[in-house]
Structure formats: C-alpha cells, structure tokens
C-alpha cells in the first residue's frame, strides 16, 4: 500500500496546540504509530517543529491555524474541517502566569483572566464546537495537570495555574454529564512535571520520556465510555 493509500485509511487526530512542546511530541508520536495528524499553530507563528514534521511526512501531517482565544477562528476551523472525521480531538494549548508562584490575592485581574480563558474557557469552546466531528467511537481529550487536582493540593504554589486546570476539569465533567448514554471516551490527562517551556528546566522528566506512555494511555481508553482523569501511567488522578 502506498503512503497516499495508507493515509486515506489511517485514523486521524486533531491536536490543538501542536507547534512545540508536548503538542508537537504528541503529533510526532501519533505519526510514528501510523496516524494522520492535523496540528494547529497560531496565525503568524514563525516556522515550528510541526512544519518540519509536516514537510517530511508525505502528506500525513496537516497544519491549521488557530488562536483558541478567538471564537471566530474556532468557528472557521470547524468550517474548514466540516465533513472530516476526527478519531481523536485533543486540546493541548495552555499557559501560566509570568510569575508562576504569584498568590491568588496578588495576581492582576488581566493576568488571571488571560490564564483562565486560555486554559479553561477556550479549550471548552474548541471541544463544544468540534465535537460533532468526533464519532461515537472516538476520543475527546484535553491536557490538564496533576496540579489541577483539588484532592492532591497539599502544598499550594502555582495557584492561578492550578485553579485554571481545576476549572478545565470541572468544565469537562459538566460537558461529560450532558452527553447521551453510552457516551464517548473523554479524557483529561495529567502528563506529570515535564521539561518544557511551561514546566521549566528543573522538571525531572523529558518530553521523550513522557509522551510515549501518555499516548499509550490515550489509545488504551478508546471504546471506554465516560470521562476519566488519568496520569501518563493510566492511574486515576483524584479530582
């Protein structure tokens, strides 16, 4: 079977926020496993590693532009993808405060709003808008964080980021509760503390160590209805 033929029969994942870091690594890993990949970058972004991946992928990696904080761009992306089937829709985009340890009572309203919109509101807008492209056998997922666990928060720190991921988790639970039974597979993933621009240089794990097991877990959940909050080893994370 030629590359062109195989691309027509392979499953497809849309990764929102795939230009660098965990999103790019996910795109690379799914491509290695025989998937077609659609990855998004923001309009006007300089050439990314996703562009390099697409150039070498023989048509199996497509690049779409999207700023998730612009609702009109989400609608436009849906229109461009109308008629396509997304076997997995995964929202990876996220941000944090300039001072990661600023206390909640001290953060500016503007910065609080920016983080909450980017990490909680905008991912749900993407999911709500594009869910009709995901079949009943597909997966809808978002990159959360172990720091979004209320039950596991015993140290504080990174309060705004924690709050935004806890909000994302709550919104995903609300979304899941509205689904008909039996519902699709839905996931919020906690990848662990990873050495990325967001995680910082002190993180104990590299992207190369973290992403293959995370993808293993995502694929292992296909066909299991309902929402789960899992780490990259498949262990349930307390809400």
Image (tube, grey):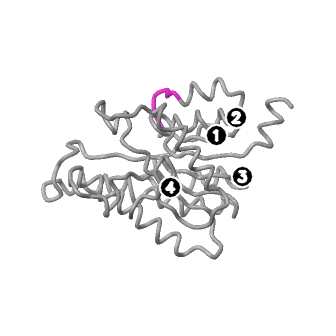
Q: CA distance from mark 2 to mark 3?
A: 14 Å
SS type, badge 3 = loop
Among the two numbered marks 4 and 1 on one chain, the one whose residue lies closer to the N terminus = 1
Where residue 237 sits: x, y (%)?
Answer: 42, 58
- The residue that disc 3 covers is 84
Residue 3 located left or right of residue 33: right
SS type, badge 1 = strand
Magenta residues, as a range?
43-49
Whether label 4 touches label 1, CB < 8 Å: no
Front tag of 2 and 3: 2
Q: CA distance from mark 2 to mark 4?
A: 27 Å
Q: Quadrant of the C terminus?
A: bottom left
Q: Is residue 173 magenta?
A: no
Q: Residue at x 54, y 75 (%)?
A: 178
Q: CA distance from mark 3 to mark 4?
A: 19 Å
Front tag of 4 and 1: 1
Q: Residues within 10 Å of mark 4 (few under 14, many from 20)?
A: few
Q: Residue at x 53, y 65 (%)?
A: 227
- The residue that disc 2 covers is 60
Among the two numbered marks 1 and 2 on one chain, the one whose residue lies closer to the N terminus = 1
- The residue that disc 4 covers is 72
């Amino acid at each position: 079977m030629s590359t062109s033929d195989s691309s027509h029969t392979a499953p497809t994942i849309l990764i929102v926020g795939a230009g660098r870091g965990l999103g790019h690594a996910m795109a690379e890993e799914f491509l290695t496993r025989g998937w077609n990949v659609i990855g998004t970058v923001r309009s006007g972004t300089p050439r990314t590693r996703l562009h390099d991946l697409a150039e070498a992928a023989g048509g199996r990696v497509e690049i779409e532009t999207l700023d998730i904080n612009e609702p009109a761009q989400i609608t436009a992306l849906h229109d461009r993808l109308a008629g396509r089937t997304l076997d997995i829709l995964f929202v990876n985009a996220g941000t944090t405060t300039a001072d990661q340890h600023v206390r909640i009572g001290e953060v500016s309203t503007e910065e609080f709003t920016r983080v909450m919109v980017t990490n909680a509101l905008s991912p749900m807008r993407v999911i709500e808008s594009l869910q009709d492209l995901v079949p009943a056998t597909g997966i809808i997922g978002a990159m959360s964080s172990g720091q979004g666990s209320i039950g596991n928060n015993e140290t504080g720190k990174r309060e705004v980021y924690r709050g935004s991921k806890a909000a994302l988790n709550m919104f995903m639970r609300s979304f899941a509760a509205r689904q008909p039974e039996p519902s699709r597979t839905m996931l919020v993933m906690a990848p662990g503390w990873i050495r990325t621009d967001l995680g910082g240089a002190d993180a104990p794990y590299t992207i190369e160590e973290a992403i293959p097991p995370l993808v293993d877990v995502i694929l292992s959940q296909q066909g299991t209805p309902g929402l789960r909050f899992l780490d990259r080893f498949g262990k349930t994370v307390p809400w």
